[in-house]
Amino acid sequence: MLSDYTPMPTLATADPQRSRAFYEGVLGFPPGEAGGDGVVYRAGTGSFLVYESSFAGTNQATAMSLQCDAGFDDEVRALRDAGVQFDTFDYEGIEWQDGVAVMGESKSVWFKDPDGNIINVMASA
């Protein structure tokens, strides 16, 4: 059954070199397997693929989320220090505190990669 397998998010890019500079240089993901049209990056116990596509930047929804409960504040600080700008939006139940969405005990930030793929970093109660 498909539920027995670990999914791999795939993020499209129009400019692989620019994406590598962002994912490796800004976000700090070490490159893994590279080949064909993309690079696989390890993240926790999973991985994600950044690949070249003419459809890059067309997704208007969250493309990838990273759960980092214990280290959320440190990760947010590191992202800010790297120049990452967080997105805010209107949504019932969210209180925004300096670009961080607070929903009860949970916190989240959203930002875009150079192609407009939306990435979420979150912490649950």
Image: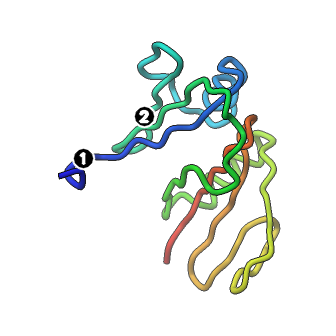
Tell me how far mark 2 sits from mark 1, CA to CA.
16 Å
Q: Decide which of 22, 78 is in the foreground and name it.
A: 22
Q: Decide which of 117, 71 is in the foreground and name it.
A: 117
Residue ID at (54%, 32%):
29
Residue ID at (47%, 43%):
9
Q: Decide which of 11, 102 is in the foreground and name it.
A: 11
Tell me where residue 100 appears, x and y as whole percent.
73, 67
Tell me where residue 78 appears, x and y as whole percent.
68, 46
What is the quadrant of residue 22 in the picture?
top right
Q: Residues within 10 Å of mark 2 (few under 14, many from 20)?
A: some
Residue ID at (47%, 31%):
41
Q: Which residue is mark 1?
A: 5
Q: Residues within 10 Å of mark 1 (few under 14, many from 20)?
A: few
Tell me where residue 99 appears, x and y as whole percent.
79, 65
Q: Nearer the viewer, mark 2 or mark 1?
A: 1
Residue ID at (63%, 66%):
108
Disc 2 residue type (three-letter): Arg
- Image height of 27 relative to 36, above or below: below
- Image height of 79 relative to 12, above or below: below
- Image height of 49 relative to 110, above or below: above
Q: Is residue 49 left or right of residue 60?
A: left
Q: Is residue 10 left or right of residue 1?
A: right
Q: Which residue is mark 2?
A: 42
Tell me where residue 8 appears, x and y as whole percent.
40, 41
